[in-house]
Amino acid sequence: MKLYAPSTIRDIKERYGFKLSKSLGQNFLTDKNIIDRIIEGAGIGPEDLVIEIGPGIGVITSEAAETAKKVIAVEIDKNLIPILKETLADRDNVEIVNQDILKTDVNKLIEDCSKGEGDFSGVKIIGNLPYYITTPIIMKLLEDGVKADSITIMMQKEVADRIKAAPGTKAYGALSVAVQYYCTVEAVVNVPKDVFVPQPKVDSTVLKLEIREEKPVELKDREVFFSCVKAGFGQRRKTLLNSLMGVKNITKEAVRESLEAAGIDPSRRAETLDLEEFANLSNEVYSRL
Ligand code: SAM
């Protein structure tokens, strides 16, 4: 049975009385080539543990299980669990977890699995994410310090463009700075909307976020760094001198001094600052709070 064939989805819907949920972002992938590109892009090896977010009916899960040592698939929709048990019946290295990924302690999943199965050579997170919560999922994993090597995920193209954007471009914003602080970002493949059932309104991109072992910049305080980024882009048309007034209870004088000490012209806007400049600036702000 070709799991990814549209006829399989139709058959499953009929046999299980399964109704696709728009609110859970259920757009199922029907293109083997794209599935292969995700698996290859993630660089899954035979001794790896794979955590998949939102397996749906298991099209990516099944392929990942063929290559990886073990796959843990976290799916929120309880109606998909019996379906996954059927579609993945011949994969004895898959564990299905019926949970909301946003409420899942992924590091504990990894730890518990390693205790039971011995060490893995790597941990790869993959998924075709529900579009409505792509950013919260990525930020939760990164802020929680997920102990994985990489996160290779499909998302709305527009979100991918924002994540990989360079300073000075329209798409560059707080999300770009935040993700690029934690990861290097690589585009794996662009995906047209006609390879999904049902078809979404937007095109998609698969990104590989390789989690940095060492951060690219030194921060005196991560919270102040992210406050500066948030304040700067919160009012992106304002100059930094004005927008940074949104950082805690900082005074205008302290903002001016911080910008000067970091060697940044106070008339510049947040969208022109690279990661290093944001780091230097936030370190100066931190010492004046
Ligand atoms: N991987 C499948 C594929 O490519 O065909 C399904 C992808 S579909 C875009 C997103 C999947 O994520 C759905 O199965 C949906 O039920 C699941 N999902 C939505 N929100 C979730 C959450 N908070 N935690 C875990 N899974 C979630």
Image (cartoon, helix red, strand yellow):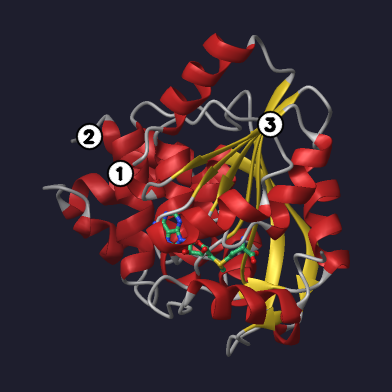
Label 1 vs 2, first from the N-terminus: 1
- x and y, in percent, of residue 14 in the image: 56, 81
What residue sits 68% from the left and 31% below the top? 93
Residue identifier under label 3? 93
Crowd rating for badge 1 (residues with CA inside 10 Å; few <14, some 14–19, many 20+): some
Q: Secondary structure at mark 3?
A: loop
Residue identifier under label 1? 257
What residue sits 78% from the left and 75% below the top? 5
What residue sits 33% from the left and 29% below the top? 221
Q: Are marks 1 and 2 in contact (CB under 8 Å)?
A: yes
Indicate left or right for 260 with 171 as reference: left
Q: Secondary structure at mark 2?
A: loop
| Amino acid type at mark 1 | Glu
What residue sits 69% from the left and 17% below the top? 120
Crowd rating for badge 2 (residues with CA inside 10 Å; few <14, some 14–19, many 20+): some
- x and y, in percent, of residue 279 in the image: 47, 39
Q: Nearer the viewer, mark 3 or mark 2?
A: 3
